[in-house]
Image: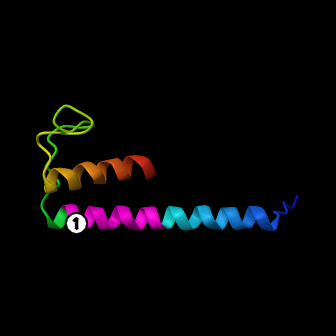
Amino acid sequence: MQIIYSQKHRYRLGQLAAHVVVALIALVVIGGATRVMEAGLACPDWPLCYGSFLPGRQMNLQVFLEWFHRLDAFLWG
């Protein structure tokens, strides 16, 4: 059985694929920045960071990179 997709469906699938590729490239770039900044252990606990979803007082560049990388990986992984 052959499934025939309309032009609209192919276009939307192409858009979805492009968005996923961009999101995964962003994840790799953020992961690289996290590694270079030695921020991989900036959040001591999982899945939270310093006991809360959004670390307030402890937020610095390293904590932000690790927290954002976790969030991005959760959303796309």
Q: Quadrant of the N terminus?
A: bottom right
Measured as percent of width and height from the top left, residue 57 is found at: 11, 39
Image-quadrant location for residue 18? bottom right
Give the residue furthest to the front: 57
| Residue at figure coordinates x 44%, y 62% from the top left | 23
For residue 47, side relative to residue 18 (left or right) = left
User: From which residue to which does the magenta span run?
Assistant: 22-34
Residue that carries the numbered disc 1 in the rendered image: 33
Measured as percent of width and height from the top left, residue 8 is found at: 77, 64
| Residue at figure coordinates x 27%, y 62% from the top left | 31
Whether residue 50 is in magenta: the answer is: no
Measured as percent of width and height from the top left, residue 46 is found at: 24, 38
* Residue nearer the viewer, 1 or 77: 77
Decide: is 1 above or below 21. Answer: above
Image-quadrant location for residue 26? bottom left
Decide: is 71 above or below 16. Answer: above
Q: SS of the residue at dot 1?
A: helix
| Residue at figure coordinates x 62%, y 65% from the top left | 15
Tell me the kind of residue under disc 1: Ala
For residue 7, side relative to residue 40 (left or right) = right
